[in-house]
Image (cartoon, rainbow, N blue to C red):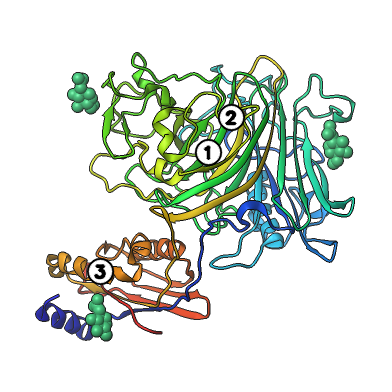
Amino acid sequence: MGVTMETHLHALLFLLSVILLTVSCVRGQQYASAVGDPGMRRDGLIVAFEAWNFCNEVGKEAPGMGSPRAADCFDLSSSTLKHKVTEDDNKLGVGKIFPGLPPGAISNADLYAANKELYLGSLCEVDDKPYPWQFWMVMLKNGNYDTKSGLCPQNGKKVPPFSSGGFPCFGTGCMNQPILYHEQTKLIDGGTLRGSFNGTYDLGAEIGSGLGGISFYEVVWEKKVGAGSWVFSHKLKTSKKYPWLMLYLRADATRGFSGGCHYETRGMLKILPESPNFKVKVTLDVKQGGGPKSQFYLIDIGSCWKNNGDPCDGDVLTDVTRYSEMIINPATPAWCGPNSQGNCPPYHITPNNKKIYRNDTANFPYGAYHYYCAPGNAKFLEKPVSTCDPYSNPQAQEIVQLLPHPIWAQYGYPTKQGDGWIGDARTWELDVGGLSSRLYFYQDPGTPPARRIWTSIDMGTEIFVSDNEEVAEWDLSNFDVILTYGNMMIELVTFPILLLLLASTAGDTKHPSSLNVEIEDAGHHKLKSWANCITGLHQQFNNVQEVHDALHRHSIACGFKCTFKHNDYTRVNTNCRAEDCPWKIRVSKLSTASFFQIKKLNETLA
Ligand SMILES: *[C@@H]1O[C@H](CO)[C@@H](O)[C@H](O)[C@H]1NC(C)=O
Ligand SMILES: *[C@@H]1O[C@H](CO)[C@@H](O)[C@H](O)[C@H]1NC(C)=O
Ligand SMILES: *[C@@H]1O[C@H](CO)[C@@H](O)[C@H](O)[C@H]1NC(C)=O
């Protein structure tokens, strides 16, 4: 940066009294894992339960069962379990007050459940750096959809009831929540901990007298005290009335929205992994597949961003949930093919970043894709195209479903049909970050690519409308989300930084390259690991909200904890903390400046 520019900057600073000072310090802490309980090895377990109807809401509680959110959380000390959630907490349902419940939510089953999850999270929360975390989440979803109910919006838009078929439903009430039985975790035979959730959708059925003809789900968790991982044993059974059921174990964001949800959620991901810099490790032992329609996801990742690349903000009309799933059931065919290109993504990107268009029939790996569907609210889709089911999420969705194929070998994914399936239990170390950075996801032409930050990572099955009563059974353990940089582990922000932000006049934007150089110069201090998080560096911010968002993302990625104290059109006041070091920012917008811009970055001691 030249002297003139420097002087100019300082003059600006002084004369316009726009001082945005950020001082931060973080000690050299390592965050190799993004989850609170890396590898599921902690004796004190934290697990929760949530059940959703077809459009990821509650709709109506099952009679006598309370709101479909529950938790089993405890600390273990000297062979005694100290439970943090009571069965009364778990039975809370509409009409019953609990701490933090907003008045408007008390009789609304959807809002009530969302708030109950936050409440259970507050009881279970484990204090940690950079954020506290709450629980693994057992997620159950009922695929029945009564189109005459008017319950599910279409791509986020409220629509009146309609009578088109195509969705399973036996009539009014088919979207019901399940019955939940909970066996609180206990120490059995001295050295083993065990607990469970189970139940059925068939209200009134007795699961004790055999499972013939009825639906059933069960998750049992078990661990030897002081050794190894928790093992989560899952079972899911469909019935004639409930032919489409889903059961997953999820690591969800500890704050913000998780995949497929437009409410604040609680979870296990204390740091949100971003493509390409993370891997997922998990041991999966499939015992029973659940029939040919069981779309067993070795891994399912979920996030949300808008078609213009912006992060989601809860506006269901423009937010788009994005999923990618690796389906390992060998009975699942590729719907994508040379003669059905509308079921393929427009192109495939190879590990060395070569684009192969789907019309390149000699080279496109059709067998690697089960199905691609585009968001229903996308405006510039390449034809032919399939759009995703518009009703099953609160907003539009996009899904990229993969199948085992040699093309995925480099990412450690299954390469052939049958890999990881029944009789082939394995511990996978999947380069989910690398693969997901090279998947096609729709964006409006000319918009800056979205940051692929994943708010949910889960495993389990979706038994998709089966005529038979199907049973799937599997064990899952050692689950971890490992943060990487390239092939190396990273340490997030291990040094103090000083960030200088100031409102600038339009004239200053002529010199962005000199600023870039300055930023790159700091590279020897592991800048790379946090260059990602300060994408706002030479960015302009049109308003306070944008500054706010950038800082928020920065704080998540860098492991700072920020509370935004004061917000109006002209100021942002934040207090950010990393370890014991305060990190303060004051941003003031000037009447003479049209936007904010981060102008300088340097490191200093607090
Ligand atoms: C379901 O869980 C309950 C305990 O909560 C247990 O008594 C029962 O045996 C379980 N049912 C089945 C069918 O596994
Ligand atoms: C294949 O698709 C690409 C992108 O849509 C297009 O540019 C190209 O012309 C197509 N090639 C053929 C041979 O149709
Ligand atoms: C950072 O500040 C120090 C002292 O204030 C200065 O010597 C150094 O050149 C600055 N580094 C960059 C990259 O601007």
Residue bearing the label numbered 2: 296
- Relative to 515, residue 535 above or below: above
Q: Quadrant of residue 500?
A: bottom left
Near-viewer residue (28 or 498): 28
Identify the disc placed on residue 519: 3
Near-viewer residue (231 or 332): 231
Quadrant for ligand 3 reads bottom left
Question: Is label 1 in a helix, a strand or a loop?
Answer: strand
Sequence-wise, the earlier of marks 2 and 3 is 2
Mark 3 vs mark 1, CA separation in Å:
36 Å
Q: x%, y% of residue 602?
A: 29, 77
Residue bearing the label numbered 1: 300
Give the residue drawn at x 45%, y 65%: 491
549 lies left or right of 430: left
13 lies left or right of 416: left
Near-viewer residue (290 or 442): 290
